[in-house]
Image (cartoon, rainbow, N blue to C red):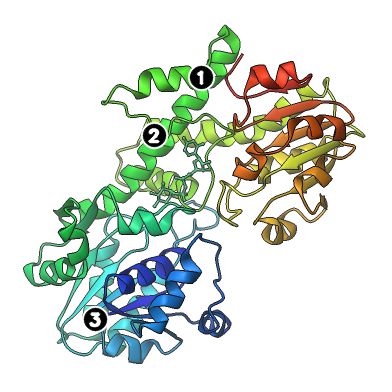
């Protein structure tokens, strides 16, 4: 089996590499020659633990290669995966499908023999029909099928999520395409991974419904955290107490500053738009989007309150900028709401993130960047933790206290123990815990 993977972004690069690890011959294609050059030198365009080694191993084994030559890659492929970006369209929040459709046109022009065209990108319901129509129009006689196969990879654990998924979803009504997909996922069949075969439209919706449900779960526990603060309850225990009920499940119940990242904000919004277009509004999801947006902004107020009602002229040390740990991704990170609001309120913000600073400097250019956590804390009036990197959990609390001018800590990820922090002399504010 041979695959062409169009797009070497997060999803394309991880999926392509993992398929090659499954023993399939994979050619990853990108228009960006610089990216392909770097990949040839085993320099990853993204930070994902373990990816560089897996790429190197599979390139060495001759199963994985990189090219800008889409035509050659598609011509020789049994299956072509579209893994290009589908960002939110400026203005209306719909998914921008221009990259997907452009890829479909190029694939149409290059296909040779029966080809399964697979959409891996997150695309609104009906996009598969559109991709099929685009290809059919350009190549009326070509033998091909269009399949939906959404990804469920989390940044930071994407390789494991691909290799040992809870399930694989494949959307097609065509037996011939199904046989090809089965062959591609043979390794997962062998380890008895549930494979959900469904129609193409259903598969497209599963992706959005899944991400939206998870975003709703997070938003629910975030609101419960706010209530905990008012009534003197502990959200950590509430999450455990409800999460042990198998009907609820304990994952995605960590209260925090609001969800961010490349998927949840964009996908919740896109599903809201689709539902409105079909005159079947998803009122719960609309509320989730609004509550999460407001939450990210409200987090700065929490910091201001912890600093006695004003941060004017005060130094605030921010630990963590990425939307979650083990990634350099800043997309829709809560820090992008919190930091500007603190600057606006007159704070002098100093920040450190283990992997995200290069990207952060482009998005938050006016703040000061420090070389490590302790340097960030030195002389600050307040420390704010926005991302739960393990290295922050491991900080020496005594040293932290001696470095801060005022021992005020606002922990938006609940990484420390409230009793220990208070016993150590900190004014410690976390999320939903007394
Ligand atoms: C998500 C989905 O999990 C994945 O299946 C999909 O394919 C892509 O989008 P990702 O964006 O990488 O993955 O990160 P995830 O771990 O899901 O976290 C998303 C956001 O929710 C982060 O900002 C995270 O901090 C937040 N979150 C997550 C919480 O606030 N609490 C939780 O309990 C879980």
Residue sitting at 77 percent across and 50 percent down?
372
Of the pair 126 and 312, the residue shown nearer to us: 312
Q: Closer to the observer: label 3 or label 1?
A: 1
Q: CA distance from mark 2 to mark 3?
A: 45 Å
Relative image position of residue 316 (x, y in whole percent): 82, 37
Q: Secondary structure at mark 1?
A: helix
Residue sitting at 47 percent across and 25 percent down?
221
Question: Which residue, given by chain and number where applicable, does mark 3 sit on?
Answer: 137
Viewed as shown, does residue 246 lie left or right of 197? Answer: right
Q: Secondary structure at mark 3?
A: helix
Q: Are there few (<14), some (14-19), or many (20+) residues within 10 Å of tag 3?
A: few
Earlier sequence position, callout 2 versus callout 3: 3
Question: Which residue, given by chain and number where applicable, does mark 2 sit on?
Answer: 251
Relative image position of residue 282 (x, y in whole percent): 35, 35
Relative image position of residue 323 (x, y in whole percent): 58, 47
Earlier sequence position, callout 1 versus callout 2: 1
Labels 1 & 2 near each other (Cβ < 8 A): no
Q: CA distance from mark 3 to mark 1?
A: 55 Å
Viewed as shown, does residue 56 lie left or right of 412? Answer: left
């Amino acid at each position: 089996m041979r695959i062409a993977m169009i797009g070497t972004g997060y999803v394309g690069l991880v999926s392509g590499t993992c398929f090659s690890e499954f023993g399939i011959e994979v050619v990853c294609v990108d228009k960006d020659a610089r990216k392909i050059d770097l990949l040839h030198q085993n320099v990853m365009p993204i930070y994902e633990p373990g990816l560089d080694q897996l790429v190197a191993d599979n390139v060495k084994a001759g199963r994985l290669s990189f090219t800008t030559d889409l035509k050659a890659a598609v011509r020789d492929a049994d299956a072509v995966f579209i893994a290009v970006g589908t960002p939110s369209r400026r203005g209306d929040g719909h998914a921008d499908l221009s990259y997907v459709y452009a890829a479909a046109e190029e694939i149409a022009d290059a296909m040779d023999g029966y080809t399964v065209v697979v959409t891996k990108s997150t695309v609104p319901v009906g996009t598969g029909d559109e991709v099929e129509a685009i290809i059919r129009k350009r190549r009326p006689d070509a033998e091909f099928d269009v399949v939906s196969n959404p990804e469920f990879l989390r940044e930071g654990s994407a390789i494991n999520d691909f290799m040992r998924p809870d399930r694989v979803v494949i959307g097609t009504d065509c037996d011939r395409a199904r046989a090809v997909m089965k062959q591609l996922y043979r390794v997962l069949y062998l380890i008895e991974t549930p494979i959900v075969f469904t129609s193409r439209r259903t598969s497209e919706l599963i992706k959005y419904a899944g991400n939206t449900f998870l975003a709703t779960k997070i938003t629910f526990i975030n609101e419960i955290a706010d209530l905990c603060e008012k009534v003197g309850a502990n959200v950590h225990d509430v999450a455990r107490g409800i999460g042990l009920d198998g009907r609820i499940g304990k994952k995605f119940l960590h209260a925090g500053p609001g969800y961010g990242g490349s998927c949840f904000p964009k996908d919740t919004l896109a599903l809201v738009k689709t539902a409105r277009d079909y005159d079947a509004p998803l009122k719960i999801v609309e509320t989730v989007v609004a509550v999460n947006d407001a939450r990210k902004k409200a987090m700065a107020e929490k910091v201001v309150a912890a600093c006695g009602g004003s941060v004017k002229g005060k130094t605030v040390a921010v630990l963590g900028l990425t939307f979650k740990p083990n990634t350099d991704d800043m997309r829709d990170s809560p820090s992008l709401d919190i930091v500007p609001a603190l600057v606006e309120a007159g704070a002098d913000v100093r920040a450190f993130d283990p992997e995200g600073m290069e990207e952060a400097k482009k998005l938050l250019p006016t703040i000061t960047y420090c070389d490590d956590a302790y340097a960030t804390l030195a002389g600050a009036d307040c420390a704010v933790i926005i991302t739960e990197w393990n290295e922050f959990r491991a900080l020496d609390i005594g040293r932290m206290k001696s470095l801060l001018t005022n021992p005020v800590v606002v922990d938006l990820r609940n990484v420390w123990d409230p009793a220990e922090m208070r016993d150590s002399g900190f004014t410690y504010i976390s999320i939903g815990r007394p």
